[in-house]
Amino acid sequence: MKRREMIKYLSAAPLAGGLAGHSLGGQPGGPPSVPWEAGAGARDLISELGLKTFINASCVCTSLTASLMPPEVTQAIVKGAEEFVLLNDVLDKVGARIAELCHAEAATVTAGCWSALVQGLAGVMTGMDRQKVMQLPNVAGMRSEVIMQRSHATGYHQALTNTGASIVLIETREEAEAAISEKTAMLWFLNRELHKGKLDYQQWVALGKKHRIPTMIDIASDAHPVDNLWKFNDMGFDLVAISGGKAMRGPQSTGILMGRKDLIAASRLSAPPNSGICRGHKVNKEEILAMYVALERHLKIDHEKEWKMWEATMAVIVDSVKGLKGVSPVVFIPEIANYTPTLHLTWDEKSIHLTGQQLKERLWNGDPGIEVMLGGTMGTKKGGIELSVWQLKPGQERIVAARVKEELIKASPETARG
Protein backbone atom coordinates (compact mmCIF):
# COMPACT_ATOMS: atom_id res chain seq x y z
CA MET A 1 0.00 0.00 0.00
CA LYS A 2 1.35 3.42 -0.99
CA ARG A 3 1.91 6.11 1.65
CA ARG A 4 -0.97 8.28 0.39
CA GLU A 5 -3.36 5.30 0.35
CA MET A 6 -2.25 4.30 3.86
CA ILE A 7 -3.01 7.79 5.27
CA LYS A 8 -6.41 7.76 3.60
CA TYR A 9 -7.15 4.30 5.05
CA LEU A 10 -6.09 5.22 8.60
CA SER A 11 -8.06 8.47 8.62
CA ALA A 12 -11.23 6.56 7.76
CA ALA A 13 -10.63 3.62 10.09
CA PRO A 14 -11.86 5.17 13.39
CA LEU A 15 -15.19 6.19 11.85
CA ALA A 16 -15.67 2.83 10.19
CA GLY A 17 -14.71 1.02 13.35
CA GLY A 18 -17.11 3.09 15.42
CA LEU A 19 -19.99 2.48 13.04
CA ALA A 20 -19.27 -1.23 12.89
CA GLY A 21 -19.01 -1.58 16.64
CA HIS A 22 -22.30 0.21 17.37
CA SER A 23 -24.47 -0.44 14.33
CA LEU A 24 -23.44 -3.82 12.98
CA GLY A 25 -22.26 -5.67 16.08
CA GLY A 26 -23.58 -9.22 16.13
CA GLN A 27 -25.54 -8.77 12.90
CA PRO A 28 -25.05 -10.78 9.71
CA GLY A 29 -22.13 -9.35 7.77
CA GLY A 30 -20.86 -7.31 10.73
CA PRO A 31 -18.32 -8.05 13.44
CA PRO A 32 -19.45 -10.11 16.44
CA SER A 33 -20.52 -8.36 19.63
CA VAL A 34 -17.75 -8.05 22.22
CA PRO A 35 -18.36 -9.69 25.62
CA TRP A 36 -18.34 -6.42 27.60
CA GLU A 37 -21.06 -4.67 25.57
CA ALA A 38 -24.16 -3.70 27.52
CA GLY A 39 -26.51 -6.62 27.85
CA ALA A 40 -23.92 -9.30 27.21
CA GLY A 41 -24.37 -12.18 29.65
CA ALA A 42 -21.51 -13.42 31.81
CA ARG A 43 -19.96 -16.67 30.60
CA ASP A 44 -19.81 -19.65 32.93
CA LEU A 45 -16.19 -20.48 32.26
CA ILE A 46 -16.07 -23.07 35.03
CA SER A 47 -18.62 -25.17 33.15
CA GLU A 48 -17.37 -24.19 29.72
CA LEU A 49 -13.85 -25.41 30.49
CA GLY A 50 -15.02 -28.46 32.39
CA LEU A 51 -13.28 -27.47 35.62
CA LYS A 52 -13.93 -29.51 38.75
CA THR A 53 -15.43 -27.49 41.59
CA PHE A 54 -15.35 -28.73 45.16
CA ILE A 55 -16.29 -27.94 48.73
CA ASN A 56 -13.27 -26.58 50.56
CA ALA A 57 -13.28 -28.07 54.06
CA SER A 58 -9.51 -27.88 54.09
CA CYS A 59 -7.48 -24.66 54.16
CA VAL A 60 -6.44 -21.64 52.11
CA CYS A 61 -3.30 -23.09 50.53
CA THR A 62 -2.22 -21.99 47.06
CA SER A 63 -3.09 -25.25 45.31
CA LEU A 64 -6.72 -24.89 46.41
CA THR A 65 -6.77 -21.31 45.05
CA ALA A 66 -6.83 -19.85 48.57
CA SER A 67 -10.16 -18.27 49.61
CA LEU A 68 -13.25 -16.98 47.83
CA MET A 69 -13.54 -13.22 47.39
CA PRO A 70 -16.67 -11.52 48.82
CA PRO A 71 -18.80 -9.30 46.55
CA GLU A 72 -17.26 -5.99 47.62
CA VAL A 73 -13.82 -7.28 46.65
CA THR A 74 -14.87 -8.54 43.24
CA GLN A 75 -16.77 -5.29 42.68
CA ALA A 76 -13.54 -3.39 43.31
CA ILE A 77 -11.90 -5.43 40.57
CA VAL A 78 -14.70 -4.72 38.08
CA LYS A 79 -14.83 -1.00 38.88
CA GLY A 80 -11.05 -0.69 38.78
CA ALA A 81 -11.02 -2.17 35.28
CA GLU A 82 -13.09 0.71 33.90
CA GLU A 83 -10.50 3.48 34.13
CA PHE A 84 -6.80 4.14 33.56
CA VAL A 85 -4.67 5.27 36.49
CA LEU A 86 -0.92 5.49 36.94
CA LEU A 87 0.43 2.36 38.62
CA ASN A 88 2.67 4.34 40.98
CA ASP A 89 -0.26 6.53 41.98
CA VAL A 90 -2.48 3.65 42.99
CA LEU A 91 0.42 1.96 44.82
CA ASP A 92 1.12 5.23 46.67
CA LYS A 93 -2.48 5.92 47.66
CA VAL A 94 -3.38 2.37 48.64
CA GLY A 95 -0.06 1.86 50.39
CA ALA A 96 -0.62 4.96 52.52
CA ARG A 97 -4.09 3.75 53.56
CA ILE A 98 -2.81 0.27 54.40
CA ALA A 99 0.05 1.69 56.44
CA GLU A 100 -2.36 3.83 58.45
CA LEU A 101 -4.66 0.89 59.15
CA CYS A 102 -1.81 -1.42 60.16
CA HIS A 103 0.32 0.96 62.27
CA ALA A 104 3.18 0.93 59.76
CA GLU A 105 5.27 3.79 58.43
CA ALA A 106 4.62 2.65 54.87
CA ALA A 107 3.20 -0.25 52.87
CA THR A 108 2.87 -1.58 49.34
CA VAL A 109 0.79 -4.26 47.64
CA THR A 110 2.83 -7.13 46.22
CA ALA A 111 2.23 -10.23 44.09
CA GLY A 112 1.59 -12.45 47.11
CA CYS A 113 3.62 -13.01 50.28
CA TRP A 114 6.49 -14.71 48.42
CA SER A 115 6.86 -11.59 46.30
CA ALA A 116 6.80 -9.44 49.45
CA LEU A 117 9.78 -11.39 50.78
CA VAL A 118 11.78 -10.95 47.58
CA GLN A 119 10.87 -7.30 47.18
CA GLY A 120 11.50 -6.48 50.83
CA LEU A 121 14.94 -8.08 50.91
CA ALA A 122 15.85 -6.44 47.61
CA GLY A 123 15.09 -3.06 49.19
CA VAL A 124 17.23 -3.89 52.21
CA MET A 125 20.15 -4.93 50.00
CA THR A 126 20.07 -2.05 47.51
CA GLY A 127 18.69 0.88 49.45
CA MET A 128 17.94 3.72 47.04
CA ASP A 129 20.99 2.97 44.88
CA ARG A 130 19.51 2.42 41.42
CA GLN A 131 22.72 0.92 40.12
CA LYS A 132 22.48 -1.82 42.75
CA VAL A 133 18.80 -2.26 41.96
CA MET A 134 19.67 -3.09 38.36
CA GLN A 135 22.57 -5.28 39.47
CA LEU A 136 20.57 -7.90 41.39
CA PRO A 137 20.85 -10.89 41.59
CA ASN A 138 24.54 -10.05 41.32
CA VAL A 139 25.24 -9.15 44.95
CA ALA A 140 28.79 -7.88 44.56
CA GLY A 141 29.39 -4.96 46.90
CA MET A 142 26.23 -5.57 48.93
CA ARG A 143 25.34 -7.12 52.24
CA SER A 144 23.85 -10.39 51.05
CA GLU A 145 23.47 -12.87 53.93
CA VAL A 146 20.17 -13.56 55.66
CA ILE A 147 20.26 -15.13 59.12
CA MET A 148 17.39 -17.31 60.29
CA GLN A 149 16.72 -20.07 62.77
CA ARG A 150 17.25 -23.54 61.32
CA SER A 151 13.68 -24.58 62.17
CA HIS A 152 12.36 -21.67 60.10
CA ALA A 153 13.98 -22.92 56.89
CA THR A 154 10.91 -24.85 55.70
CA GLY A 155 10.89 -23.86 52.02
CA TYR A 156 9.37 -20.39 52.04
CA HIS A 157 12.80 -18.99 52.88
CA GLN A 158 13.85 -19.88 49.33
CA ALA A 159 12.06 -16.73 48.20
CA LEU A 160 14.88 -14.73 49.76
CA THR A 161 17.48 -16.44 47.58
CA ASN A 162 15.77 -15.01 44.48
CA THR A 163 17.66 -11.80 45.21
CA GLY A 164 20.99 -13.63 45.09
CA ALA A 165 21.27 -13.62 48.87
CA SER A 166 22.60 -16.62 50.78
CA ILE A 167 21.07 -18.16 53.91
CA VAL A 168 22.87 -18.57 57.23
CA LEU A 169 21.17 -21.02 59.63
CA ILE A 170 21.53 -20.73 63.41
CA GLU A 171 19.84 -22.26 66.44
CA THR A 172 20.84 -20.20 69.48
CA ARG A 173 21.34 -16.54 70.28
CA GLU A 174 25.05 -17.20 70.67
CA GLU A 175 25.19 -18.70 67.19
CA ALA A 176 23.27 -15.74 65.80
CA GLU A 177 25.67 -13.26 67.41
CA ALA A 178 28.64 -15.16 65.97
CA ALA A 179 27.06 -15.29 62.49
CA ILE A 180 26.45 -11.54 62.24
CA SER A 181 29.09 -9.83 60.13
CA GLU A 182 29.59 -7.05 57.63
CA LYS A 183 27.87 -9.35 55.10
CA THR A 184 24.62 -9.64 57.07
CA ALA A 185 21.71 -7.97 55.30
CA MET A 186 18.71 -9.10 57.32
CA LEU A 187 17.36 -11.29 60.13
CA TRP A 188 14.30 -13.28 58.93
CA PHE A 189 11.57 -14.87 61.06
CA LEU A 190 8.84 -17.31 59.97
CA ASN A 191 5.88 -16.81 62.29
CA ARG A 192 4.43 -20.26 61.64
CA GLU A 193 7.50 -21.87 63.21
CA LEU A 194 7.58 -19.67 66.33
CA HIS A 195 7.56 -22.54 68.81
CA LYS A 196 10.09 -24.65 66.92
CA GLY A 197 12.88 -22.11 67.33
CA LYS A 198 14.81 -21.11 70.43
CA LEU A 199 14.45 -17.35 69.86
CA ASP A 200 11.10 -15.59 70.16
CA TYR A 201 9.83 -12.32 68.66
CA GLN A 202 11.30 -10.00 71.25
CA GLN A 203 14.71 -11.67 71.19
CA TRP A 204 14.82 -11.53 67.40
CA VAL A 205 13.84 -7.86 67.21
CA ALA A 206 16.30 -6.99 70.01
CA LEU A 207 19.09 -8.74 68.12
CA GLY A 208 18.35 -6.67 65.04
CA LYS A 209 18.19 -3.40 66.97
CA LYS A 210 21.45 -4.16 68.77
CA HIS A 211 23.36 -4.69 65.51
CA ARG A 212 21.30 -2.24 63.42
CA ILE A 213 20.24 -4.98 61.05
CA PRO A 214 16.68 -4.97 59.60
CA THR A 215 14.32 -7.72 60.77
CA MET A 216 11.53 -9.20 58.66
CA ILE A 217 8.68 -11.50 59.70
CA ASP A 218 6.59 -13.66 57.36
CA ILE A 219 2.99 -13.92 58.66
CA ALA A 220 1.49 -15.27 55.42
CA SER A 221 -1.57 -17.08 56.85
CA ASP A 222 -1.91 -15.10 60.03
CA ALA A 223 -4.56 -12.44 59.46
CA HIS A 224 -6.39 -14.12 62.37
CA PRO A 225 -6.52 -12.94 65.07
CA VAL A 226 -7.03 -9.55 63.48
CA ASP A 227 -4.56 -7.68 65.70
CA ASN A 228 -1.75 -9.58 63.93
CA LEU A 229 -2.12 -6.96 61.21
CA TRP A 230 -0.49 -4.34 63.44
CA LYS A 231 0.99 -6.41 66.28
CA PHE A 232 4.33 -7.05 64.59
CA ASN A 233 4.71 -3.47 63.37
CA ASP A 234 4.12 -2.29 66.93
CA MET A 235 6.58 -4.90 68.18
CA GLY A 236 9.40 -3.37 66.14
CA PHE A 237 9.89 -5.64 63.14
CA ASP A 238 11.27 -3.52 60.30
CA LEU A 239 9.31 -5.39 57.61
CA VAL A 240 6.16 -7.52 57.77
CA ALA A 241 4.96 -9.69 54.86
CA ILE A 242 1.49 -11.22 54.60
CA SER A 243 -0.68 -12.94 51.99
CA GLY A 244 -3.74 -11.12 50.71
CA GLY A 245 -5.73 -14.04 49.37
CA LYS A 246 -5.97 -16.19 52.47
CA ALA A 247 -7.85 -15.06 55.61
CA MET A 248 -8.38 -11.54 54.27
CA ARG A 249 -10.13 -12.95 51.16
CA GLY A 250 -8.45 -10.61 48.71
CA PRO A 251 -7.16 -11.68 45.28
CA GLN A 252 -4.96 -14.76 45.66
CA SER A 253 -2.17 -13.10 43.70
CA THR A 254 -1.79 -10.24 46.19
CA GLY A 255 0.12 -9.67 49.39
CA ILE A 256 1.25 -6.78 51.56
CA LEU A 257 4.72 -5.62 52.49
CA MET A 258 4.71 -3.06 55.29
CA GLY A 259 7.19 -1.52 57.66
CA ARG A 260 9.88 1.17 57.68
CA LYS A 261 9.32 3.96 55.20
CA ASP A 262 12.86 3.92 53.84
CA LEU A 263 12.82 0.17 53.25
CA ILE A 264 9.42 0.23 51.53
CA ALA A 265 10.60 3.06 49.26
CA ALA A 266 13.74 1.09 48.39
CA SER A 267 11.73 -2.08 47.75
CA ARG A 268 9.50 -0.23 45.29
CA LEU A 269 12.52 0.44 43.05
CA SER A 270 12.79 -3.30 42.33
CA ALA A 271 9.10 -3.70 41.48
CA PRO A 272 6.82 -2.62 38.60
CA PRO A 273 6.65 -0.21 36.92
CA ASN A 274 10.43 -0.19 37.46
CA SER A 275 12.73 -2.74 35.84
CA GLY A 276 14.29 -4.33 38.90
CA ILE A 277 14.42 -7.96 39.95
CA CYS A 278 10.69 -8.01 40.79
CA ARG A 279 9.58 -6.59 37.44
CA GLY A 280 7.79 -9.86 36.73
CA HIS A 281 5.96 -9.66 40.08
CA LYS A 282 3.33 -7.40 38.58
CA VAL A 283 0.11 -6.56 40.43
CA ASN A 284 -2.51 -4.84 38.31
CA LYS A 285 -4.52 -1.85 39.48
CA GLU A 286 -7.66 -3.94 39.92
CA GLU A 287 -5.90 -6.30 42.33
CA ILE A 288 -4.32 -3.46 44.27
CA LEU A 289 -7.70 -1.81 44.81
CA ALA A 290 -9.31 -5.13 45.69
CA MET A 291 -6.56 -5.89 48.21
CA TYR A 292 -7.29 -2.60 49.94
CA VAL A 293 -11.02 -3.32 50.06
CA ALA A 294 -10.37 -6.83 51.41
CA LEU A 295 -8.19 -5.42 54.19
CA GLU A 296 -10.79 -2.80 55.11
CA ARG A 297 -13.49 -5.45 55.19
CA HIS A 298 -11.36 -7.75 57.35
CA LEU A 299 -10.80 -4.98 59.87
CA LYS A 300 -14.47 -3.96 60.01
CA ILE A 301 -16.29 -7.29 60.28
CA ASP A 302 -17.49 -8.59 63.64
CA HIS A 303 -14.91 -11.29 64.29
CA GLU A 304 -16.62 -12.47 67.46
CA LYS A 305 -19.84 -13.07 65.53
CA GLU A 306 -17.87 -14.75 62.75
CA TRP A 307 -16.19 -17.07 65.27
CA LYS A 308 -19.54 -18.10 66.77
CA MET A 309 -20.80 -18.87 63.29
CA TRP A 310 -17.76 -21.11 62.68
CA GLU A 311 -18.38 -22.91 65.97
CA ALA A 312 -22.03 -23.51 65.08
CA THR A 313 -21.04 -24.75 61.64
CA MET A 314 -18.45 -27.10 63.11
CA ALA A 315 -21.02 -28.43 65.61
CA VAL A 316 -23.14 -29.72 62.73
CA ILE A 317 -20.28 -31.92 61.53
CA VAL A 318 -19.23 -33.05 65.02
CA ASP A 319 -22.79 -33.94 66.02
CA SER A 320 -23.22 -36.06 62.90
CA VAL A 321 -20.40 -38.45 63.84
CA LYS A 322 -20.72 -38.45 67.64
CA GLY A 323 -22.98 -41.48 67.60
CA LEU A 324 -20.62 -43.62 65.55
CA LYS A 325 -18.85 -46.31 67.53
CA GLY A 326 -15.07 -45.92 67.70
CA VAL A 327 -15.06 -42.40 66.19
CA SER A 328 -13.31 -39.59 68.07
CA PRO A 329 -13.96 -35.99 66.96
CA VAL A 330 -11.68 -33.41 68.61
CA VAL A 331 -11.99 -29.71 67.81
CA PHE A 332 -8.86 -27.62 68.32
CA ILE A 333 -7.53 -24.18 67.37
CA PRO A 334 -4.12 -23.98 65.66
CA GLU A 335 -2.18 -21.41 67.68
CA ILE A 336 -0.44 -19.98 64.62
CA ALA A 337 -1.46 -20.09 60.93
CA ASN A 338 -5.06 -20.82 59.94
CA TYR A 339 -6.29 -19.73 63.37
CA THR A 340 -9.80 -21.17 63.12
CA PRO A 341 -11.81 -24.05 64.65
CA THR A 342 -10.38 -27.25 63.16
CA LEU A 343 -11.60 -30.83 63.55
CA HIS A 344 -9.22 -33.76 64.03
CA LEU A 345 -11.30 -36.84 63.32
CA THR A 346 -9.94 -40.30 64.14
CA TRP A 347 -11.48 -43.74 64.43
CA ASP A 348 -10.71 -47.30 65.42
CA GLU A 349 -9.35 -48.74 62.18
CA LYS A 350 -9.87 -52.29 63.51
CA SER A 351 -13.63 -51.84 63.37
CA ILE A 352 -13.80 -49.14 60.69
CA HIS A 353 -11.65 -50.43 57.84
CA LEU A 354 -10.58 -47.09 56.45
CA THR A 355 -7.41 -45.04 56.57
CA GLY A 356 -7.28 -41.27 56.65
CA GLN A 357 -5.88 -41.24 53.11
CA GLN A 358 -8.69 -43.44 51.86
CA LEU A 359 -11.37 -41.27 53.43
CA LYS A 360 -9.75 -38.15 52.01
CA GLU A 361 -9.74 -39.70 48.52
CA ARG A 362 -13.34 -40.91 48.75
CA LEU A 363 -14.56 -37.48 49.82
CA TRP A 364 -12.66 -35.86 46.95
CA ASN A 365 -14.02 -38.33 44.38
CA GLY A 366 -17.61 -37.93 45.53
CA ASP A 367 -20.26 -35.68 44.05
CA PRO A 368 -19.73 -32.98 45.05
CA GLY A 369 -16.03 -33.39 45.75
CA ILE A 370 -14.91 -32.39 49.23
CA GLU A 371 -11.32 -31.48 50.09
CA VAL A 372 -10.07 -32.21 53.62
CA MET A 373 -6.62 -32.57 55.18
CA LEU A 374 -4.83 -35.59 56.54
CA GLY A 375 -4.37 -35.79 60.29
CA GLY A 376 -1.23 -34.06 61.48
CA THR A 377 -1.48 -31.24 58.93
CA MET A 378 -2.21 -28.58 61.55
CA GLY A 379 0.20 -29.87 64.14
CA THR A 380 -1.94 -32.58 65.74
CA LYS A 381 -0.98 -36.23 65.97
CA LYS A 382 -1.12 -38.07 62.66
CA GLY A 383 -3.99 -40.34 61.77
CA GLY A 384 -7.51 -39.77 60.50
CA ILE A 385 -8.40 -36.53 58.81
CA GLU A 386 -8.61 -32.85 59.68
CA LEU A 387 -11.09 -30.35 58.36
CA SER A 388 -12.04 -26.73 58.84
CA VAL A 389 -15.24 -24.83 58.15
CA TRP A 390 -14.18 -21.23 57.54
CA GLN A 391 -14.19 -21.60 53.75
CA LEU A 392 -17.57 -23.34 53.53
CA LYS A 393 -20.51 -21.69 51.82
CA PRO A 394 -23.78 -21.62 53.81
CA GLY A 395 -25.30 -25.10 53.95
CA GLN A 396 -22.19 -26.95 52.82
CA GLU A 397 -21.50 -28.09 56.39
CA ARG A 398 -24.49 -30.43 56.13
CA ILE A 399 -23.14 -31.94 52.92
CA VAL A 400 -19.73 -32.46 54.55
CA ALA A 401 -21.33 -33.98 57.66
CA ALA A 402 -23.47 -36.38 55.64
CA ARG A 403 -20.61 -37.51 53.38
CA VAL A 404 -18.14 -38.10 56.21
CA LYS A 405 -20.71 -40.09 58.15
CA GLU A 406 -21.71 -42.05 55.06
CA GLU A 407 -18.13 -43.13 54.30
CA LEU A 408 -17.41 -44.12 57.90
CA ILE A 409 -20.56 -46.24 58.03
CA LYS A 410 -19.84 -47.86 54.66
CA ALA A 411 -16.40 -48.87 55.93
CA SER A 412 -17.97 -50.83 58.79
CA PRO A 413 -21.71 -51.29 58.36
CA GLU A 414 -21.99 -53.79 61.22
CA THR A 415 -20.05 -51.96 63.93
CA ALA A 416 -19.97 -48.28 63.01
CA ARG A 417 -23.55 -47.53 64.09
CA GLY A 418 -23.94 -46.47 67.71
Image (cartoon, rainbow, N blue to C red):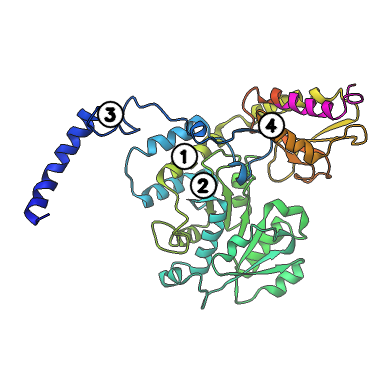
| Residue at which label 3 appears | 26
| Residue at which label 4 appears | 389
Q: Earlier in the sequence, mark 1 or mark 2?
A: 2
- Give the secondary structure at mark 3: loop
Mark carried by residue 290: 1
**Dots 1, 2 in contact, CB < 8 A:** yes
Q: Earlier in the sequence, mark 4 or mark 2?
A: 2
Where residue 92 sits in the image (x, y, percent)? 41, 50
Q: Residue at the spot x=58%, y=58% of the render?
A: 238
Q: Which residues are magenta?
A: 400-417
Q: How far is mark 2 from mark 3, CA to CA?
A: 37 Å
Q: Earlier in the sequence, mark 3 or mark 1?
A: 3
Q: How far is mark 4 from mark 2, CA to CA?
A: 23 Å
- Give the secondary structure at mark 4: loop
Q: Amino acid at mark 3?
A: Gly
**Dots 2, 3 in contact, CB < 8 A:** no
